Image: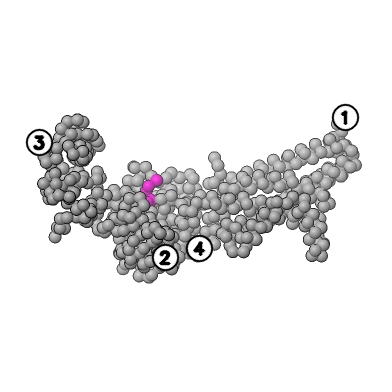
């Protein structure tokens, strides 16, 4: 069954078009990530799905029913916010149980669901604490628990990990992936962090300026980006873009090559000087400045001794390169 | 000048009068405080939610109360309204009504400020988790507003308690009235009003302490530490 269908959804705030003709289908059990830079409309799209904003035009269907005029309370969704939005005057247990109580859910059902969410999210020791007594990661787990107990048709996550530090972000990311596997519910997750998008998603929706740039699995988007924006947005370090004409390509085109597809050789096509070296332990990022003033990042696996200021030559396999026209569209036909 | 406090504390009638007056002042303040708070919640809600007509009525009412002296409100309630509507209540009931109306206007403004401190995300989270507007207000917004504004509400409560001395003007036998009566009998003004001052201070501090404990007990997660 289809969990969500968006048909030609548009949203404007006054004269400003924030979402333009969004079409999307999310199947049951699918993990879909909306990704894009700040201001691209990804959170607004999530809010339109939640019912916190009305679509200016188009249809929003959840579990087969059109819900444009249905309030959030009746959409069968549960949302987790970046700010957690926990109720500070209630304990962890009360935070999780409140929405169920007001729906008139029987006490034993509430107790069972809270117990299940508590077990799943390892919140046992904190049930009688209030949000002020919890760490950021614990608060986010409570916010997730509050959504889980409702057993919604659709989970919505609005940048849930943005307020956490790097290590906690990774741990919570793994927890969310595990949660998705155990619940098998459809989840929509908004982030500007492409690592989260790549690691969590079954399907990524890349947004820019309120439009969908491309939809596909993480590897589809990574290996076969539709345009320069998608190619540059996914991947860390980001794809290098060079003037294709200087490398034997067509004039006016841009050549894109990922840092891991470049290699340092004695006689490469890209020549320059090492401007900076990032030793990450497991990898080394070497930033080379070419004669044309372009900065090219090379990702070398393992530790690579390299000094700033030395000259370097880089090369790549043509099969790994992407060509984009002046407007950013892919020039080379997609592989069959 | 020779101080003759014993003229007060050796006379059981005077002590009883003071005790009765203190009990009446405290009782009226607490009752008016609680009923005023209930009325204030309605007033603040009407204004905060911009309820048509009611919001404007609430705004007008609050401005009317906050821009007139308590003693004028007291005379209006005790003498003006009974004349207009033809009813007769005991003095303490008039005082209770006047204090309730007065408390409600000040409390409502504090609560309204409290409502606006509740983050938009709290409303949205509740909506996105299936809660309906009335319940969001009752379960999420109101408790947080009261918890955050509890120190201000407590301060206003104690301040209004101290202004209750004016109800003696309509003949209510409160603490101030008891002091005035004892003074008129003993002519020991310094001793009488110093005693009255000390009783008021003790009662204010008791109210403050009790309210601080109540704040900690009622809202353990929202008390500044």
Q: 10 Å neighbourhood of mark 3: few (<14), some, or many (≥20)? A: few
Q: What residue is drawn where x is 67% and y is 54%? A: B63
Q: What residue is drawn where x is 33% and y is 66%? A: A8
Labels 3 and 4 within one chain: no
Give the residue pinned by disc 3: A266
**Extent of the magenta region:** A159-163
The residue lying toward the viewer, choosing from B80 and A197, is B80
Q: What residue is drawn where x is 31% and y is 54%? A: A208
- Left or right of B35, for residue B3: right
Q: On the image, which quarter does residue A280 sit in?
A: top left
Give the residue pinned by disc 1: B2
Colouring method of the image: one colour
Q: Is residue A56 above or below residue A305?
A: below
- Left or right of B46, for residue B1: right
Q: Which mark is residue B132?
A: 4
The question of residue B38 being in magenta is answered with no
Q: 10 Å neighbourhood of mark 2: few (<14), some, or many (≥20)? A: many
């Amino acid at each position: 069954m289809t969990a969500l269908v968006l048909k030609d959804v548009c949203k404007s705030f006054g004269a400003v078009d924030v979402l333009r003709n969004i079409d999307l289908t999310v199947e049951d059990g699918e993990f879909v990530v909306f990704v894009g830079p700040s201001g691209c409309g990804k959170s607004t799209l999530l809010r339109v799905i939640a019912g916190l904003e009305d679509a200016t035009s188009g249809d929003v269907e959840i579990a087969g029913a059109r819900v444009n005029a249905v309030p959030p309370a009746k959409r069968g969704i549960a949302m987790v916010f970046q700010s957690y939005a926990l109720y500070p005057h209630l304990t962890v247990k009360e935070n999780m149980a409140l929405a169920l109580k007001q729906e008139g859910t029987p006490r034993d059902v509430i107790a069972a669901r809270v117990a299940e969410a508590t077990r799943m999210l390892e919140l046992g020791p904190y049930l009688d604490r209030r949000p002020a007594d919890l760490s950021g990661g614990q608060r986010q787990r409570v916010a997730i628990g509050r959504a889980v107990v409702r057993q919604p048709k659709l989970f919505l996550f609005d940048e849930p990990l943005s307020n956490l530090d790097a290590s906690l972000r990774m741990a919570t990311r793994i927890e969310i992936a595990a949660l998705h596997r155990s619940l098998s519910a459809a989840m929509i997750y908004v982030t500007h962090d492409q690592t989260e998008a790549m690691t969590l998603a079954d399907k990524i929706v890349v947004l820019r300026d309120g439009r969908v740039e491309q939809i596909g699995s993480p590897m589809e988007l990574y290996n076969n980006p539709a345009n320069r924006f998608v190619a540059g947005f996914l991947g860390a370090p980001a794809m290098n873009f060079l003037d294709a004409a200087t490398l034997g390509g067509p004039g006016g085109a841009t050549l894109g090559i990922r840092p891991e597809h470049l290699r340092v050789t004695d006689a490469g096509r890209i020549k320059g000087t090492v401007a900076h070296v990032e030793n990450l332990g497991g990898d080394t990022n070497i930033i080379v400045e070419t004669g044309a003033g372009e900065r090219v990042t090379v990702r070398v696996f393992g530790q690579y001794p390299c000094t700033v200021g030395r000259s370097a030559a880089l090369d790549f396999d043509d099969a790994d390169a992407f060509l984009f026209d002046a407007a950013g569209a892919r020039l080379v036909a997609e592989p069959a | 000048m020779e101080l003759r406090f014993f003229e007060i504390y050796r006379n059981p009638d005077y002590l009883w009068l003071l005790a009765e007056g203190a009990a009446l002042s405290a009782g009226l303040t607490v009752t008016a405080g609680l009923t005023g708070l209930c009325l204030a919640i309605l007033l603040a809600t009407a204004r905060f939610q911009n309820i048509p007509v009611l919001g404007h009525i609430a705004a007008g009412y609050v401005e009317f109360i906050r821009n007139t002296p308590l003693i004028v409100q007291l005379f209006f309630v005790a003498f003006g309204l009974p004349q207009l509507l033809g009813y007769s209540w005991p003095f303490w009931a008039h005082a209770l009504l006047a204090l309730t109306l007065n408390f409600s206007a000040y409390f409502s403004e504090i609560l309204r400020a409290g409502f606006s401190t509740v983050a938009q995300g709290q409303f949205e989270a509740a909506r996105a988790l299936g809660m309906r507007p009335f319940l969001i207000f009752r379960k999420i917004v109101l408790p947080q507003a009261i918890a955050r504004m509890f120190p201000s509400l407590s301060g206003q409560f104690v301040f209004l308690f101290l202004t209750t001395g004016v109800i003696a003007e309509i003949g209510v036998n409160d603490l101030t009235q008891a002091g005035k009566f004892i003074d008129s009998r003993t002519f020991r003004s310094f001793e009488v009003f110093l005693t009255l001052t000390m009783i008021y201070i003790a009662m204010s501090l008791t109210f403050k302490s009790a309210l601080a404990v109540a704040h900690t007990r009622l809202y353990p997660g929202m008390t500044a530490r």
